[in-house]
Amino acid sequence: MNRLTDLLGTALPLIQAPMAGVQGAALALAAGRAGALGSLPCAMLAPEAMRQELQRLAASGLPYNVNFFCHAPPTPDAAREAAWRAALAPYHAEIGLDLATIAAGPGRLPFGTAAAEVLEAFRPRVVSFHFGLPAPELLARVKAWGAVVLASATTVDEARWLEANGADAVIAQGLEAGGHRGHFLSDDLTRQSGTFALLPQVKAAVRVPVIAAGGIADAAGVRAAMALGADGVQVGTAYLCSDEATTSALHRAALQSEAARHTQLTTLFTGRPARGIVNRAMRELGALNPAAPAFPLATAAIAPLRAHWEAQGRGDFTPLWSGQNASGCLSASAAAITAALAEGFSPGL
Ligand SMILES: Cc1cc2nc3c(=O)[nH]c(=O)nc-3n(C[C@H](O)[C@H](O)[C@H](O)COP(=O)(O)O)c2cc1C
């Protein structure tokens, strides 16, 4: 269809966004069979689980994308951890939990040699990264089998950096997007802009194909992004209530309720800004509370609160990731959602 589909090997210039924690190979396969590029998020998968998911994808014969985070592992900061625990202490006390018994520790690992080894056996056609690119020697391993490398940019500077450092296409991630912001050159959120402000500026700044992401939830959104010069689109939130996603019932209900009209960027759940539906934790602690430890260390101390309230059927301390446009969150098959989005690529519609 265009130079992006040539690169990805798909019928459509549409990527089902990788979404760690809410999907696996099943969603990627369903989106892939419908003509999109399906994605497997690996940020929360140990090597053996990753291998099993990759086996399912490889058996399909479809092109697919394997996605990783590539943050610098944080240096633990005892003072910040203590401040974080002090901020959460009243909530632990409220439910009778002893914070002292909760171990600090990371929940998400960046792309490293163990993942590269698993990946090498499968040689996926596309590999995408969030939070920049891995170290040059790791990137070279991925490129060695000819993988197409994609990465998210939240500013024009990041798009230029990615192109200069080996990305074959750039995902322009607007502020509307659900989940983690992909920034890596600056954590100043005021430098970031909405999809339709970012996209044409990125397009003018780089020669590689540009994929628009953030707020695209239906065929009209796809058409608008393509009209603004996108070579393709990446859609996440609209797949969250698909039959094949593993999104919890609680999260699905929030996405399909009035609550989804109010999202905010928050560091409370992982330590990095990510967009989710506003809940009690965000309202009471402040969504960007400076005590939250560096990514991904914030998760450990808030996770028991999440588990407690989820068991009561409440999402008060749950990361209810969502983009600003949850209007496309239909309870439908990924094939139906993909087909509806694909209408946006038809000329004259
Ligand atoms: C629940 C959720 C989880 C996400 N996890 C990842 C991830 O693991 N890796 C990644 O590169 N992007 C992740 N993203 C961001 C998407 O790649 C994409 O930028 C975003 O979904 C596009 O905006 P939209 O949600 O408005 O469609 C996630 C998004 C959501 C909603």
Image (spheres, rainbow, N blue to C red):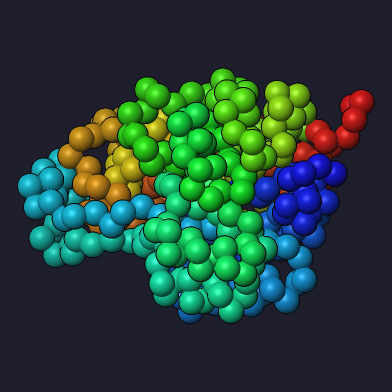
Where is 49 relative to 221, above or below? below
- Image quarter hosting the C terminus: top right
- What percent of the width, then of the height, locates residue 345? 83, 36
Nearer to us in this view, 275 or 75: 75
**Residue 244 appearing in the image:** no
Tell whether 75 sits left or right of 227: left
Residue placed most toward the observer, 152 or 241? 152
In the image: residue 263, left or right of residue 333: left
In the image as oriented, which residue stretches furthest toward the right? 348
Which residue lies most toward the top here? Answer: 197
Extreme residue toward the front, this view? 164
Residue 84 is situated, as x and y percent measured from the top left of the image, at 16, 45
Residue 234: x and y, percent? 64, 42
Q: Quadrant of residue 39?
A: bottom right
Q: Residue at x 63, y 29 (%)?
A: 203
In the rendered image of this protein, does residue 135 appear above or below residue 231? below
Residue 144 horizontal side relative to residue 35, left or right:
left
Q: Is residue 172 visible?
A: yes
Residue at image position (48%, 48%) is 165
Q: Is 151 in front, or is 45?
A: 151
Asked where in the image residue 256 lies, by quadrant, the reply is top right
Q: How many marks?
A: 0
Q: How far across and down, in percent of the image, does residue 341 sit?
A: 77, 39
**Residue located at (24% from left, 54% from top):** 74
Return the residue nearer the eye: 329 or 149.
149
**Quadrant housing the N terminus:** top right
Name the residue rendered at 33%, 34% in the picture: 187
